[in-house]
Amino acid sequence: MLTRSGKFVAITASGCLAMSVLGVTGAAAETAFAPDTCASGYVWRGARPSDHVCVDPSVRDRTRSENASGVWHACTTGFVWREAYPGDYRCVVPSSRTQARRDNDSAVRRLAWVIMVKRNHAGSRPSCDGGSCSTTNEGPYQTVVVRGYYLTPGIQVTIQVKHASDDRVLWQGRTTAQAGGKGPAGSYSVDTERVLCGGSSFAPPLTAYVVVRGDGGQWSPRVPIAWRPCGLV
């Protein structure tokens, strides 16, 4: 099982593909990878063997205790079904079900394979008019970067941004995971060269999503993002 500890790096998006970093630290370097590897500070929940939702370690510990309780289906007064996954009829306190729903909603934003950051450039601040934004290269501006960690050095990484409604590819990049750098084990960092416009929030509408895979293997879970037309003028 691939689990990690440390600080969490959040994915945020609005405007062109607006992103920000809350922080990242290295765990013990390991040459291992999987698209559902958790970002530092999170571990797989384990409500069932295939439950790889990334949660706080305390939630995993509570989930283990709930699984060991043997209470299933017929809940007594004060207990409800946990519903961590479809068919999860483990009887738990209501706060545990609420936590499971929150963790399910946040799971894709806790993946070590898909971390969205921003890169500073010389150029002007972006200006926005309605649904599109633009900037010049006469002052500071930012572009969107996709990063990921816990990869085997040398692995080929493909990154795609797709439209949420029809899976149309909006942007695609490819790179090689490198040893060392700012992440544990192998890591990659790709500048999409998309100008960051319109703020930095993960508020709806989330009109696109990001997926990543290595060496033609399994795609990572979809990471919903906001996408806004934006460019240099």
Image (spheres, helix red, strand yellow):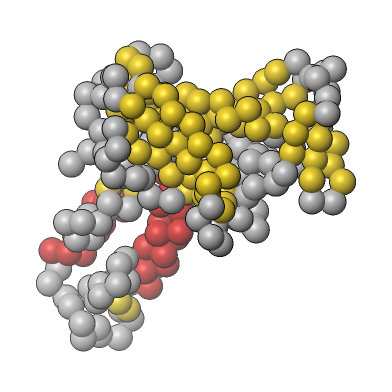
The residue lying toward the viewer, choosing from 191 and 174, is 174
Q: Residue furthest front?
A: 168
Q: Taking the image as drawn, is residue 192 in sight?
A: yes
Q: Residue at x 45, y 59 (%)?
A: 105
Q: Taking the image as drawn, is residue 91 in sight?
A: no
Q: Residue 127: where, in percent of width, then height?
A: 85, 36
Q: In the figure, 130 relative to 178: above or below? A: below
Q: Is residue 83 left or right of residue 198?
A: left
Q: Residue at x 38, y 50 (%)?
A: 221
Q: Residue 166: where, in percent of width, then height?
A: 53, 60
Q: Residue at x 40, y 59 (%)?
A: 104
Q: Is residue 118 left or right of residue 129?
A: left
The residue lying toward the viewer, choosing from 202 and 130, is 130
Q: Give the total of numbered labels.
A: 0
Query: Which picture quadrant has residue 42?
Result: top left
Query: Which picture quadrant has residue 184?
Result: top left
Q: In the figure, 86 relative to 144: above or below? A: below
Q: Residue 150: where, in percent of width, then height?
A: 31, 29
Q: Quadrant of the C terminus?
A: top right
Q: Is residue 50 left or right of residue 163?
A: left
Q: Quadrant of the N terminus?
A: top left
Q: In the figure, 193 relative to 90: above or below? A: above
The residue lying toward the viewer, choosing from 71 and 20, is 20
Q: Residue 52: where, in percent of width, then height?
A: 27, 51
Q: Residue at x 65, y 58 (%)?
A: 205
